[in-house]
Image (cartoon, rainbow, N blue to C red):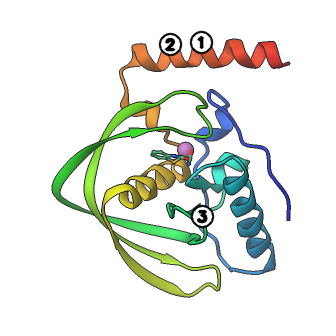
Amino acid sequence: MAILDILEFPDPRLRNKADPVTQVDERIQTLVADMLETMYNAPGIGLAATQVNTHKQVVVIDISEDKDQPLVLINPQIDILPDEEKEYEEGCLSVPGFYETVTRPTHIHVNALNKQGERFELEAEGLLAVCIQHEIDHLNGRLFIDYLSPIKRQRIRKKLEKQHKQQA
Ligand code: GNR
Ligand code: NI
């Protein structure tokens, strides 16, 4: 297992669109294990392959208190149940240090493959629904800060660029 480097905004590779996984083989299982280790180490409640510069449709999530309920979503398909929207204060490992309110649909239905390559379905609401939508956005090259005003996004960009220069 390995802890992978996480790309940070405004890295243009975060804008890549992930390709579907054609076969859930050993390479994908290694990626999943490394992503889980990277997510738990960060620590975070979710991680998309895009964030570790692998442009395949793979997501890991664990919103449990004890960090013992990993959820793996491969090739996730999402259906929005457009009855209700809710605000949530979101953060992102690729936008470290910034937390902003995002409004998203409350209820979703997800169809995905698990790490054995078997198809399963899931209804989600609350934090899990927020997290799944946040991660599927990553697979489509979208970040939570894209829902903010251009002024706020620009301010975050400048601060992170400055930090990255100081780290270089
Ligand atoms: O760790 C994370 N916390 C979080 C909080 C609110 C909404 C979404 C998230 S996901 C984030 C980890 C991450 O960046 N996943 O892509
Ligand atoms: Ni994120």
Horizontal side of residue 79 vs 27, given as left or right:
left
- Above or below 113: residue 84: above
Q: Are marks 1 and 2 in contact (CB under 8 Å)?
A: yes
Instruction: Give, as a three-letter code, the residue at label 2.
Output: Arg
Name the residue beneath numbered marker 1. Answer: 158
Instruction: Give, as a three-letter code, the residue at label 1.
Output: Lys
Q: In the image, residue 69 lies at what x, y percent?
A: 56, 72
| Mark 3 neighbour density, 10 Å: few (under 14) some (14–19) many (20 or more) | few
Name the residue beneath numbered marker 2. Answer: 155
Residue 67 tag number: 3
SS class, disc 2: helix
User: Does any atom of ligand 1 lie closer than 8 Å to the CB of label 3?
Assistant: no
- Above or below 138: residue 121: below
Q: Nearer the viewer, residue 47 or 65?
A: 65
Q: Are marks 2 and 3 in contact (CB under 8 Å)?
A: no
SS class, disc 3: loop
Q: Nearer the viewer, residue 128 or 54?
A: 128
Instruction: Give, as a three-letter code, the residue at label 3.
Output: Lys
Q: For residue 167, which quarter of the picture? A: top right
